[in-house]
Amino acid sequence: MKKSSRGRLHWQPIIGATIVLFMLAVAIVGPFLMPYGEAEIVGFAFDLPSPEHPLGTDVLGRDVMTRLVYGARNSIGLALAVVVLSFLFGASLGLLSATLGRGVDFVLSRFFDLILAIPQKVFALLLLAILGTSLPVLIIVVAFLDSPRVFRISRAIGLEINALDFVETARLRGDSGLGIMLRETLPNSLPTLVSEFGLRFCFIFLFISALSFLGLGLQPPSADWGNMVRENASLIGFGEMMPLYPAFAIALLAVGVNLVTEWLAERWSNPAHE
Amino acid sequence: MKDLMRSPVVKMMVARLLIGLGTIAVISFVIYGVIELLPGDIAREVLKSQATDESVRAFNERLGLDRPFLERYFEWLGNALHGDLGRSLISDVPVSELLAQRVKNSAFLAVLAAVLAVPLALLLGILSATFRNSVFDRATGITTLACVSLPEFALGYLMILFLAVKTGLFPSLSVIDPGAPLLERIWQTVLPALTLTLIVQAHMSRMTRSSLVALFQRPYIEMAELKGLRRRKVVWRHALPNAMGPIAVVITLNMAYLLTGIVVIEAVFAYPGLGQLMVDAVARRDIPLVQAASLIFATFYVSLNTLADVIGIVTNPRLLYARK
C-alpha cells in the first residue's frame, strides 16, 4: 500500500478493517467454539464472572459470553440480509428511474418521498403491529423502510453517469434502456454504491438493535445485541456494567464499518491519492 | 399588501405549506390503509387462539372491516379531526382518553430536551468553529462520534448508571405525577431529557461548526480579520448572522428527529409518554391505538420538516433580495 500524499500511514482503515474482520470471524466461527448453547441455562441468574463463565450469567442463568457470540451471528446476519434486500430494491429502482426518466422517474420518486416523509421508527412500529414480528416480516419491513435512501443516492449517481458521453453513445447505438442500465450505469455506479452499503449497514444495524431493544426485533430465546440489553437491564440498577457489553459491541462495529467506509469513499472520490 | 403577495418568498412559503398539508393527508391515508396489507383474515391473525366465529365477527365489526375501505377511511379521518380516534382493541377505552395525558408528558419531555439541546449545541458548535483544530474542538468531535455510534438506549442506560445509580444525583426511573409542581416534574424528567439532548446535539453542533467554518473561507471574513478585528468579534458579528439561516434549518430538522428518539428513550426510563404507549400497543397489536399514535407522531414530524423548509426559504438572501 502506498503512503498518501501527506506521507502518513493510513491508520483509519487498518483499525476499521481489524474491527470488522474480528467481528465477522466471531459471527461466523464463534458459535462453533462456544461450550454452551445459545439458550442453554447453565447456572443461576446473574452469576459473577468465573473461569467457566468469563462474563458471568444473564437474567435466566445463561452464559453471557456465549450469548454475545451468538448475538454477533444473529445481529450481523440479520442486518446484512436487510441491507442486501434494501439495495436490491432501492438501487435497481433508482438506476431504472434514472435511466428511463420521465413518467417512471416521477412516480417512483414521489412514492419514495412519501415513505421518507413518515418517521421511520414510527412507520416500522405501525407495520410490525399489523404484520406481526416474525423474522421474514422484520427483514422485509426494515429493508422496505430503508430503501428510499438507497433509491435516492442510486438515482442521483445514475443521472450523473447517464449524462456522460459513453451512455449517449450507447443510446445512439440503439441499446435498450435496460441494457444501458445493466452494462453502462450499474458498473460505473458500483464504487459509490459500495461505500453507501457500509453507511446503510451501520444505520440499519443500529435501527434493528433499537427495535430488538423495544422487544419488536428478533424474538427470544434468540440472542441479539439489542434484546440482550433489555433482558438484563435490571442489573444496571445495581451499578453493574454487564448489560451494556452488547451495546458496546454494537458501537464498536458501527465505528469500524464507518472508518472503512469513509476511507473507501475518500479514496474513490480523490484518485489523486493513489 | 399586493406587493407582498407577489413576492417569490411568500409564494414559495405558501406552496411549501400546502405541500406539507397534502403530505399529512396522504400519510393519514397510508397509516389507515396499511391494515389492508395483511393477507388473509386480520381478525384470526390478531386474536390467535381466542378466534371463535363470534369473536372474529365482533372484531371485524369493531374495526369496521365489514364495510368498504374508502368509506371507513373517510369516517376515521373525519372522526380523527374531531379528536375521536376510535376505541382501543384491548381495553375498549376511547383512544383519545388513553392518549391525552401521554401526549402532554411526551411534549414536556421533548420541550425540556429541546431547551437543553439547542443552546448547548449552538455554544459547542460556535466554540469549536472559533477554536477549530484545538484540543477542545477535537475532544467535542470525538465525544460527538461516540454519542452517534452508541445505540440510543445504551446512552440512556449509561446516564442511569453514572448519574443515578453510582452518584444518586437524579432518579433513575421517571415517576410522573401531572399534579406535581414544575420543579419536581423537571427533576423527574431531566435524565431522559439529557439523554435526548446528547443524541440530537451531536448533529446540530457539528453542522453549526461546519457552516461557520465554511463562512470563514469567504473574502469578507478575511477582510474583517485583516482589519485587525479580534477572532471573537469576527465570529459573532460577521460570520454568525450569515450562518443563522442554515443553522436554524438544521435545528428544526433535529427537533423532528428528537421526536422519534422519544420512542426508545421513554422505554429506557419507563417514562409514561406517547412512545411507550405506542410500543406497548404494538406488542399487543392494539391497531387503532397504534394508528392514532402514528398519526400524531407523523403530523408533528411533517410539521417540523415543513417549518425547516419555510425557515430555509425565509432566511435565504438570494430569495429575499431577488433581482427584479
Image: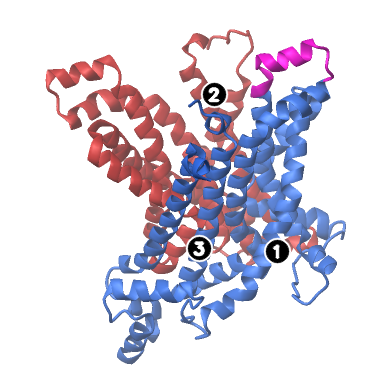
Chain colours: A red, B blue
* Chain containing mark 2: A
Q: What residue lies at 46% left-to-right and 30% top-to-bottom?
A: A195
Q: Which element type, helix, strand or loop, lies under badge 3? A: loop
* Chain containing mark 3: A
Q: What residue lies at 55% left-to-right and 71% top-to-bottom?
A: B280
Q: Rounded to the nearest whole Å, what is the CA distance between mark 3 and mark 2?
A: 34 Å
Q: How many marks?
A: 3
Q: Residues within 10 Å of mark 1 (few under 14, many from 20)?
A: some
Q: Rounded to the nearest whole Å, what is the CA distance between mark 2 and mark 1?
A: 42 Å
Chain part drawn in magenta? B214-230
Is B181 above or below relative to B58? Answer: above
Question: Do we see residue A33 in this rendering?
Answer: no
User: Which label belongs to residue B108?
Assistant: 1
Label 3 or label 2, whichever comes before in sequence order: 3
Three-letter amino acid code at the position of disc 1: Phe
Mark 2 lies on residue: A263
The prevailing secondary structure element of the residues shown in magenta is: helix
Is A3 above or below relative to A162? Answer: above
Mark 3 lies on residue: A216
